Image: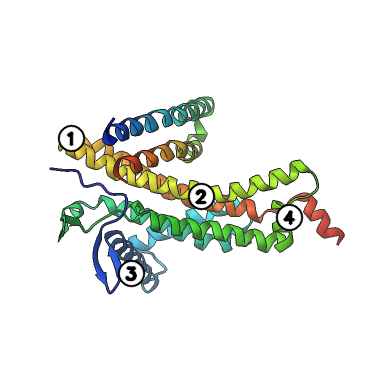
């Protein structure tokens, strides 16, 4: 037996020249699942909620009060909340779905051995990078909308003194580093969890992998929360107006 | 040396050295959180999630090392 570990997702088949990978299939399945749940709840809303509606209400209310406590105002929280909650729920479902028992046994017959049909959606770097770009671009757009285009550029190109100019350039590097740090954190955690689980199953198939599975569940929830929270914190930082700017605006 | 041997050594060094920093950082976070809970046990429900989040952020440098290791081994 040989360990089947690859960083790139396996291509199952082609639709014309478009490669369909196993992680693509699963991310579509997860989206479909979330959309179906949404519709089920939307069309069966009751004044006296059932179990499913109760759980959803608790999740939504708790996360909204969390967003409000971080960002500080009800009005801003209402604008940011959809993005925050979507990111959180999507990543959480994608991570938790990796613990459905039996999915790892499904495989297709390929050219060089069996191809697994299931792959954790967040263990595909392309998927994680797209989510990261959504969150980072939103942060930039919020910053431009709050500070204005010139105020936004002025943060990076500051000619008042050599030191400020240098710090501005460092800020550009910092913004670019956000892409790497956000995406590597999520991808690394989930992919490493998969590899760890596989290696443990390979070494000792019984009982010993269990604690690592528990650790995996913890990482799955914590990483989904961390990704969404960091997006929220970046947006909060970008949407805050500094005091000297307020003075400037008032005097204009 | 053979390429495979160099790869194995490089992967071991990358994750081994890369794990030192985050390990120290997470230890500091855990000890401070325990101290805070010991001083004021009522706020433990507030401190615990914060502790997990900050730990996950501290862990990220270790995760970078891990990603590099995995790329060396399987990329």
- Residue A237 image position (x, y, % from top left): 63, 51
Residue A203 is marked as: 1
User: Between disc 1 and disc 4, whose residue precedes?
Assistant: 4
Residues behind callouts 2 and 4 on a single chain: yes
Residue A229 is marked as: 2
Chain letter for mark 1: A
User: Between disc 2 and disc 1, whose residue precedes?
Assistant: 1
The one of A133 and A98 positioned closer to us in this rendering: A133
User: Between disc 3 and disc 4, whose residue precedes?
Assistant: 3
Q: CA distance from mark 2 to mark 1?
A: 36 Å
Q: What residue did someone put label 4 on?
A: A154
Q: CA distance from mark 2 to mark 4?
A: 27 Å
Find residue A106 and report its image quarter: bottom left
Please name which of the two marks, 2 or 3, marks the residue nearer to the observer.
2
The one of A27 and B49 positioned closer to us in this rendering: A27
Residue A36 is marked as: 3
């Amino acid at each position: 037996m040989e360990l089947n570990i690859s960083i790139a997702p396996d291509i199952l088949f082609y639709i014309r020249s478009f490669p369909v990978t196993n992680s693509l299939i699963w991310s579509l399945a997860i989206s479909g699942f979330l959309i179906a749940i949404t519709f089920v709840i939307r069309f069966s809303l009751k004044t006296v909620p059932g179990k499913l509606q109760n759980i959803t209400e608790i999740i939504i209310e708790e996360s909204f009060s969390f967003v409000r406590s971080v960002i500080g105002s009800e009005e801003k929280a209402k604008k940011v909340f959809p993005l925050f909650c979507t990111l959180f729920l999507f990543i959480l479902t994608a991570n938790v779905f990796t613990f459905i028992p039996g999915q790892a046994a499904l495989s297709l017959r390929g050219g060089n051995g069996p191809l697994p049909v299931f792959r954790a959606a967040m263990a595909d770097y392309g998927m994680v990078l797209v989510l990261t770009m959504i969150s980072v671009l939103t942060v930039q757009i919020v910053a431009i909308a709050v500070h204005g285009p010139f105020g936004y550029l002025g943060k990076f190109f500051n000619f008042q003194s050599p030191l400020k100019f240098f710090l501005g350039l460092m800020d550009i590097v910092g913004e670019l580093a956000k892409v790497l740090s956000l995406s590597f954190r999520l991808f690394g955690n989930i992919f490493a969890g998969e590899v760890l689980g596989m290696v443990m199953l390979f070494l000792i198939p019984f009982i010993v992998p269990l604690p690592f599975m528990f650790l995996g569940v913890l990482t799955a929830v914590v990483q989904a929360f961390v990704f969404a929270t960091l997006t929220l914190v970046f947006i909060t930082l970008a949407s805050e107006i500094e005091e000297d700017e307020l003075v400037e605006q008032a005097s204009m | 040396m053979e390429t495979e041997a160099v790869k194995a050594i490089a992967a071991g060094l990358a994750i081994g050295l890369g794990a030192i920093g985050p390990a120290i950082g997470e230890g500091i976070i855990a000890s401070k959180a325990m101290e805070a809970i010991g001083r004021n046990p009522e706020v433990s429900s507030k401190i615990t999630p914060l502790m997990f989040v900050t730990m996950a952020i501290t862990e990220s440098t270790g995760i970078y090392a891990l990603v590099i290791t995995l790329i060396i081994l399987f990329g």
